[in-house]
Image (cartoon, rainbow, N blue to C red):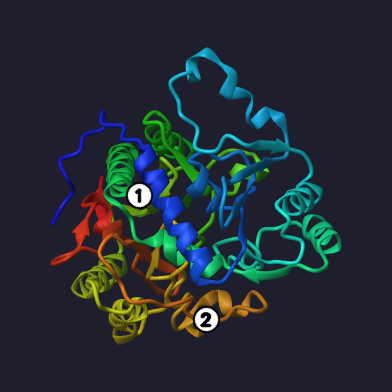
């Protein structure tokens, strides 16, 4: 299967039917987990878990009782003042009860108001293990206030169960996934068109981000990862994003790579784009071939009934057979990132092993049987020495062959 016939003027949105679906699934999770309520932290976390229940992000927290309406908390009235404007009159907000203040005291007040001071309450966000928040996303002072104010509440960590619940997408959510992937496809094409010798890295960055933002999408942190150079295995936002200074220029023989994160309607997709500039070292063609074999191995395994980590192992095998190492995971789920394969296969071969302390292979994160409707980021990468090629796009598990939502970034491109 290839990219759908959805166009970039579609702009799908979620209906109240999707709200009822999500809330019903959440109530079922609460019941099955023998909880009296669920506290879902979004804050400034990468996954914005609160948005799954609210369909908006106000850097907040949703308190979802087993019975009754959810309550939405935010830190400032700025985040909800937009609800008052005339241009938002046709918007139906999912949660009416919104409260403003410090999260710790607010949560104590809400749980007390609901008469749940001696209850069993689930928490999403304490131990998320998502990228950049491996130790959770809740501030110490917030949680300290909650524990002191509610000493008789039994708090239960629920980030993984909640994430697993989010993974299987409805038809409405899949429309958002397709649209975000289509935005990413156009961003990849623009990157391919712009990348040439003498072009500034900053101009490539700007061109990609313009595509994302001009189609009502955003880019989740770290927003856009780029590397420039024949021997650049760095995988982070460009240095000048923070430190300032001039960006790098693309030179003949360089490989320009990007991890692109289009997020539309609260769902994230990912693309791994590689553009090599002639003359291309033979090692890059070799690594592209390895990465492509990994991609194809993943396609053969991405089907209902297969365990995710079996899929991850299948994608890792071509890298191991080729004697390469990897920098980033070969595959992970998206929206949320809760299923992840090994990170840093054969990392003992990497040149970075001698330069930094604590470098090690990170173990797989979580596992489950795949079902139709689960979106996955395929991102096979193969490294040898200081050379690296990373390719891939978003794939959706479905009955039969998986749905490939991207075609441009699934192999390395060559330009002059």
Q: Residue at x 31, y 32 (%)?
A: 11
Q: Residue at x 78, y 53 (%)?
A: 108
Between the C-alphas of marks 2 and 1, the distance is: 33 Å
Residue 183 spot, x, y in % from top left: 32, 39
Q: Residues within 10 Å of mark 2 (few under 14, many from 20)?
A: some
Task: Classify 315 as above or below 225.
Answer: below
Marks 2 and 1, the one that precedes in the sequence: 1
Which residue is most to the right?
Answer: 148
Q: Quadrant of residue 321?
A: bottom left
Asked whether 345 or 233 is in front, the reply is 345
User: Residue 361's mark?
Assistant: 2
- Foreground mark, 2 or 1, reads 2
Q: Residue at x 56, y 58 (%)?
A: 66
Residue 358 spot, x, y in % from top left: 65, 79
**Pointer 1 residue:** 252
Q: Secondary structure at mark 1?
A: loop
């Amino acid at each position: 299967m290839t990219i759908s016939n959805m166009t970039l003027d579609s702009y799908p949105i979620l209906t109240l039917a999707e709200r009822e679906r999500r809330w019903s699934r959440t109530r079922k999770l609460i019941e099955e987990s023998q909880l009296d309520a669920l506290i879902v932290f979004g804050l400034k976390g990468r996954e914005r878990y609160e948005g799954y229940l609210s369909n908006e992000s106000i850097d907040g927290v949703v308190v979802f009782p087993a019975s009754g309406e959810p309550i939405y908390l935010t830190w400032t009235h700025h985040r909800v003042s937009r609800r008052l404007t005339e241009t938002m009159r046709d918007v139906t907000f999912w949660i009416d009860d919104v409260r403003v203040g410090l999260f710790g005291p607010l949560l104590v007040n809400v749980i007390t108001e609901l008469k749940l001071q001696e209850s069993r309450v689930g928490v999403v966000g304490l131990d998320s293990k998502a990228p950049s928040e491996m130790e959770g996303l809740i501030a110490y002072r917030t949680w300290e206030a909650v524990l002191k104010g509610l000493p008789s509440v039994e708090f239960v960590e629920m980030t993984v169960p909640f994430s697993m619940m989010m993974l299987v997408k409805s038809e409405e959510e899949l429309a958002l996934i397709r649209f975000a992937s289509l935005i990413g496809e156009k961003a990849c094409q623009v990157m391919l068109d712009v990348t040439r010798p003498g072009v500034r890295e900053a101009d490539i960055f700007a061109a990609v981000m313009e595509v994302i933002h001009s189609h009502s999408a955003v880019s989740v942190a770290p927003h856009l990862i780029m590397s420039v150079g024949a021997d650049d295995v760095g995988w982070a936002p460009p240095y000048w994003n923070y430190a300032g200074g001039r960006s790098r220029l693309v030179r003949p023989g360089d490989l320009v790579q990007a991890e692109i994160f289009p997020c539309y309607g609260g769902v994230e997709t990912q693309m791994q784009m590689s553009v090599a500039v002639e003359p291309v070292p033979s090692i890059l063609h070799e690594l592209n071939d390895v990465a492509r074999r990994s991609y194809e191995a993943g396609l053969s395994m991405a089907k209902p009934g297969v365990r995710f980590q079996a899929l991850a192992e299948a994608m890792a095998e071509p890298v191991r057979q080729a004697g390469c190492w990897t920098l980033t995971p070969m595959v992970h789920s998206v929206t949320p990132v809760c299923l992840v394969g090994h990170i840093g296969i054969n990392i003992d071969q990497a040149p970075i092993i001698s330069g930094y302390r604590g470098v090690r292979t990170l173990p797989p994160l979580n596992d489950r049987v795949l079902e139709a409707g689960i979106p996955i980021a395929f991102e096979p990468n193969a490294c040898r020495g200081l050379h690296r090629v990373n390719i891939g796009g978003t794939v959706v598990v479905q009955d039969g062959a998986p749905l490939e939502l991207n075609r441009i970034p699934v192999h390395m491109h060559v330009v002059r």
